[in-house]
Image: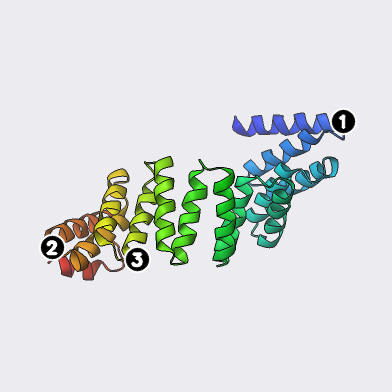
């Protein structure tokens, strides 16, 4: 049924273009349809045709960047996200995607700048603050990271990954009680988050020195992930 509705939509837009070859929205929508079907090469053709009608359109440049990124062409993706930002300096999503590519390529300073721009342009974007926090943490800027994780959590309190990585930032800053609280919150939201139990086990065992809590979390860890690469060592601690 879904396949049929896609085919119908594609036929409709192709017919529309036949009647009006300068109809930008039809090319753009065809690009989106092909992208949704992961047919990125076809999508790129339609986005480029859309740009032929409406040059430098930021939304089209952004979607073109996404299609190139999906094909693994980071350079073309960076080029199109950058053009989208030049045409619309408030384009938060383009800043985020461009920041993600710079993070992937270990260019943390550039990523931080881009995520900051995203957060300024869309202060209510969880993704902008969360990604900025991750970039700060990777750069060992733990105070800034903690602040941004807390902002992200205020925007979306039930995102377990934000609590988990806040715990990592506290741990790396040597604030183990705060780290434990963040990990506890993460596993209360996501019961299957084995990494949270692992972090708690280690903190209670090595840092806070609460053996019973350490054993509880190590047991939970092995119950969720029995094939853990360090299962034998963890079992030794439990015993």
Tell me, for residue 1, which label it has, or none: none
Q: Image quadrant for the C terminus?
A: bottom left
Residue identified by numbered label 2: 211
Residue identified by numbered label 3: 172
Callout 3 secondary element: helix
Of residue 195 and residue 10, the one placed in the foreground of this image is 195
Q: How is the image coloured?
A: rainbow
Callout 2 secondary element: helix
Q: Which quadrant would residue 168 be assigned to in this image?
A: bottom left
- Marks 1 and 3, how far apart in space? 60 Å
Of residue 214 and residue 85, the one placed in the foreground of this image is 85
Percent of width and height locating residue 101:
60, 59
Q: Which quadrant would residue 76 be assigned to in this image?
A: bottom right
Tell me, for residue 20, which label it has, or none: 1
Q: Is residue 75 left or right of residue 113?
A: right
Please count the marks in the image. 3
Percent of width and height locating residue 217:
21, 57
> 10 Å neighbourhood of mark 2: few (<14), some, or many (≥20)?
some
Circle nearer the N terminus (2, 1): 1
């Amino acid at each position: 049924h879904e396949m049929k509705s896609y085919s119908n939509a594609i036929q409709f837009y192709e017919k529309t273009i036949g009647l009006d070859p300068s109809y930008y929205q039809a090319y753009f929508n065809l690009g989106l349809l092909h992208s949704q079907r992961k047919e990125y090469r076809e999508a790129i053709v339609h986005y480029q045709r859309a740009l032929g009608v409406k040059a430098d359109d930021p939304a089209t440049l952004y979607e073109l960047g996404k299609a190139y990124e999906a094909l693994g062409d980071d350079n073309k993706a960076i080029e199109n996200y950058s053009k989208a930002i030049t045409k619309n300096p408030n384009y938060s999503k383009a800043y985020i995607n461009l920041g993600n590519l710079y993070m992937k390529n270990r260019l943390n300073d550039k990523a931080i700048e881009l995520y900051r721009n995203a957060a300024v342009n869309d202060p209510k974007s969880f993704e902008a603050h969360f990604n900025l926090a991750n970039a700060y943490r990777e750069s060992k800027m733990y105070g800034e990271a903690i602040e941004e994780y807390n902002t992200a959590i205020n925007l979306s309190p039930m995102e377990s990954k934000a609590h988990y990585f806040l715990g990592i930032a506290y741990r790396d800053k040597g604030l183990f009680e705060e780290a434990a609280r963040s990990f506890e919150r993460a596993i209360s939201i996501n019961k299957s988050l084995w990494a949270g139990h692992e972090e708690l086990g280690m903190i209670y065992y090595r840092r806070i020195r609460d053996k019973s809590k350490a054993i509880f979390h190590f047991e939970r860890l092995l119950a969720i992930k029995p094939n853990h690469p360090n299962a034998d060592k963890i079992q030794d601690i439990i015993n």
